[in-house]
Structure formats: C-alpha cells, structure tokens
Image (spheres, rainbow, N blue to C red):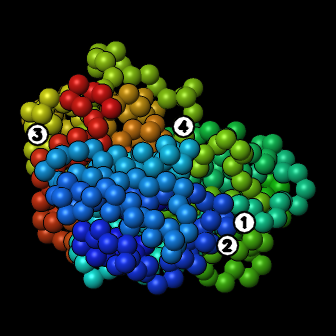
Amino acid sequence: MLLDRDGTLIEDVPYNGDPEKVRPVPGARAALDRLRAAGLRLAVVTNQSGLARGYFTGEQMRAVHARVEELLGRFDAWLVCPHDDEDRCDCRKPAPGLVYAAARELGTTASRCVMVGDIGRDVAAALAAGATGVLVPTPVTRPEEIAAAGWTASDLPAAVDEILRRQRAVLPTTPPDGPVRTALVVRSDSAGDVLVTGPAIRAVAAGAQRVVLLCGPRGRAAADLLPGVDEIIEHPLPWIDSTPEPVDPEDMRSLTARLGAVDADQAVVFTSFHQSALPLALLLRMAGIGRIAAISDDYPGSLLDVRHRVPVGVPEPERALSLAAAAGHRLPDGDEPVLRLRHDVVAERPSDLGDPGYVVLHPGSAASSRACPPEVATRIAAALTAAGHRVLVTGGPNERAVTARVAAAGGTDLGGRTDLAGLAGIVADASAVVVGNTGPAHLAAAAGVPVVSLFAPTVPFGQWGPYRVPTVRLGDASAPCRDTRAASCPVPGHPCLSDVDPGAVVDALRMLAVGNGGGR
C-alpha cells in the first residue's frame, strides 16, 4: 500500500515544516490499522518541492514525518521527491520513480502495489509504474482528474474498505465439492474479452484436470493463446454478440448436445458487467451440468448453484478472478494475477522488422468508437518518427487503408500482415504500444509492454484499461460519449480522441522510460 501524504493522510498545509500543524484526515488511523492487521506493508510516497524552494529543511520535514507516525502509526518506508517541476526529475509525481522505489523498499513489484492519493498526479504515477491508483478527491481535486481516474473513493476509510474487499474476493471461501475432472469455462465476445479472462481461467485450470473453453468466433484467436485451456468449443451466442444472428432452435439444440458431451463436473460462465449469463445457464442445465457458477444481478432461480455479485468498477480480470474464487478456485502460489499468453503459440517476430525496441502504433478497433481517428494517428506517427522512434503500424485486413495512410507519415505498414498470434509476437518485442481500448492493449499487458492508452471513455477505464502494466492514459475522459458503451461514435467529430496532442504521446513514452533507441 502506497499513500500520498498531504491531502490523503493529513490535512494539506502548503509547504508545512511545522509538526504542530499536522492533522490526520478523519478515520485515517483506524483505516491504516486495518491495512496493517491484514498484513499489508505501508509506504508514504510524497512530493515535497518545499525542500527545493527552501521553505523548510530536511530536518524540519523529518520532524513532520515523526509527528505523522506518532499520530497514525509506523510506516514501513518513506519515499520523498525533494525536487521542483523545473528539475525534470524521474521521481516527482506524475513520474513513476517514487512508486518503483517504494515497491523496492517494500520488497515487491509495482504491479502488486495500490497507490492512494488526492490528485491526478498520484494516480498517473501509479499507472505509469503499472500499479493501481485510487483517487480520494478533496476540494482541490480538479473535475478532469476525477473523470480520468479509474477508481475513486469518497474518503480514505472507504478506499481501504474496497481494497480489502477486493483482496478477499479473489480468495476461495470453500473448495469445490470433490475433485474436478473437467471444468467448462465460458467467455464469449471479442478477443480482448477473452484475454482479460485469462487469469481466472488459469485459476480454474489449477483446480481441474481438464478445462474446456466455450468461446465465440470473434474470441477464438485469443482463446488459442491462453494458458490452461485443453480444448476449445467455438460457437456464437446470440444473446452476447453485438451483431447477432436470429436464434435458431436447431442450432441451440446442437450446442446443448455438444456441451453435454463435454461431461463437465462444473461450469463457470464469465461475462462482462453488462451481459447476462442466464440464457447459457439454462442450456447448461439442459445439457446435464450439475454445478454452474456465474455473476448475476438478475434472479437466477434454479439456473445457478453459485450466484456471484460484483460491485461496479472492478477491473475485468479481477471481476473474473472473483467468480473463479466463488466457484472454489484460485491461482496457484507463484502465479501472479496478470495477463499471460502461451509462449508456444505466439508467433516469432518477422526478421525483416529489424531488432526489438520499436513502438507499435495500432490505430484501429473492431468498435469504431474506440479507434483513434486516422488524422490523429497520422500526426502521432509523424511525431514519433521525428522524435527518433521506429514505428510499426499494425491493423487487421479490413484496416489496410488506414494503416497505409498512417504509416505514410512515418513507420512501417503491417496492416493485414499478421494474425493475432503474429501480432502478439510483434508486440512482445516492442518497447511500447500506442493503442486504444482494444485487443492489442491487452496483448501488451500480457507481454509486460508499456502502453500509451488512447482510451475512449465509452466504457470505464477502471474496468477495461490495460491491466497491471505501465500505462499513460490520454484522451478526454469526460467527453459526451462517456459510459455509453457505444460501438460507433455517438458524438460528431470523435471529441474524446480528436484533440490528443501527438507531443503528449512522445512525452508519455518519455515518462514510461521508453528511449528512442528502443530502451526501457
């Protein structure tokens, strides 16, 4: 647990060097003691430009910190940036240096840390390090910072409540009834949906002898990349697909028979927060599967044995992991809850692309509302090339016209040249990926490659942003399309991404420590 100091732990007194002015925020001591009791280590991560400006001395600052510990209890580490913005250091938030340093002090990695702060700089520093950021707004927090935050809480105790709830939610409370010979897991929809379900599927696989995955045609290529899957059944589900065919009774009877032939001991039905698992649960009952688990806000009657509920806002990988836990499964020790791919099926990068260390620019998306406008992507390609980056422009077969246009401004056009496994290999050797909210962002997360996220806010960033990988978010988080889930842009001019400054993309790569020679 990483915590900002002023405005988060104690009342914000500008440039305070006086221990007598230290006032904890309401409920801070009790909240911190709950974290300590849960076994979490705590560090304070704070910008203190007053040192650089001479407003107080190091000795005075340490006296303030001693008073904080007197009132709030001991912290395992204190990480301080003593610089001002003009120093352009790597440690002053929103740069991620302090987050990385705190993780080292605590004996862990940034991806296993949660950072709580009161302004956008705190959240941005966490994201840029691959940590989770929680914003607790105060009167000084700007509205655009609140809109951009993936996770907000009303106060520090509320943030701690949710942190501990999410920690408990991925741990099983009861094991399955007896050994699981065959588990049927279900994740329909797109490639990105399947990829973010990967940790939960690995959790099920850890407790089952055999795992069969039911997916749709749009997610099949991603299903082939997932560890823990022994067999795949590909079949469209008309209550899930965004452009469904009419329901064919004979087709449903055929699917039911095929599911019955799996002879599964249990089924775990993974869905997104706006989808229903109940139509498939009915087919699974008809197929004779005796134990079915799913997330359902709707009353399921006798369709579910495990009816799980998840609050709004939980990241999709954690949402799925919590369902796996409710069904009695958890990741084995040593398997972090991050996205992973099967190394044996990820294609090798073509030799004609040169050495690793390029920047992948992926402007398109299956949902046009989440694609980067071509004119913006073109300016980004030109800016990246001018800054000395090698750029590979990627896209599907139906995006060749866009990738050719973008690559003409600077970069190599790979539009239509790769399947998903080939794209995964290219992404794995990149120094960073510049991409919207679409499948390649999750490929990057699975490879541990930093992401500059051109994120259209049609869906919540906290649920669908790149998971546990260093990220910088760009775009207008408060645009009128926010939370509409629109597949095509509902607002003329695509305002959420049309004003992205190419220079901000270059700056984001610098913040992510991506050099123009390909180094990180």
What residue is at 81 percent from the left and 42 percent from the top? Answer: 209
What residue is at 56 percent from the left and 53 percent from the top? Answer: 197
Asked if residue 147 can be seen in this view, the reply is: no
Q: Is residue 260 above or below residue 511?
A: below
Reading the image, the residue beneath label 3 is 383
Spatial separation of the CA atoms under disc 2 and disc 4: 27 Å
Asked if residue 59 can be seen in this view, the reply is: yes
Q: Residues within 10 Å of mark 3 (few under 14, many from 20)?
A: many
Reading the image, the residue beneath label 4 is 341
Reading the image, the residue beneath label 1 is 326
Spatial separation of the CA atoms under disc 2 and disc 3: 47 Å
Marks 2,1: beta carbons within 8 A: yes
Of the numbered discs 2 and 3, the one sitting upstream in the chain is 2
Could you say where residue 393 lies in the image, as x and y percent from the top left? 24, 35
Reading the image, the residue beneath label 2 is 308
Q: Where, quadrant-wise, is the C terminus in this rendering? A: top left
Q: Residues within 10 Å of mark 1 (few under 14, many from 20)?
A: many
Of the numbered discs 3 and 1, the one sitting upstream in the chain is 1
Q: Is residue 320 above or below residue 452?
A: below
- Identify which amino acid the numbered label 4 is placed on: Leu
- Identify which amino acid the numbered label 1 is placed on: Ala
Could you say where residue 497 lies in the image, as x and y percent from the top left? 19, 59
Spatial separation of the CA atoms under disc 2 and disc 1: 7 Å
Of the numbered discs 2 and 1, the one sitting upstream in the chain is 2
Spatial separation of the CA atoms under disc 4 and disc 3: 31 Å
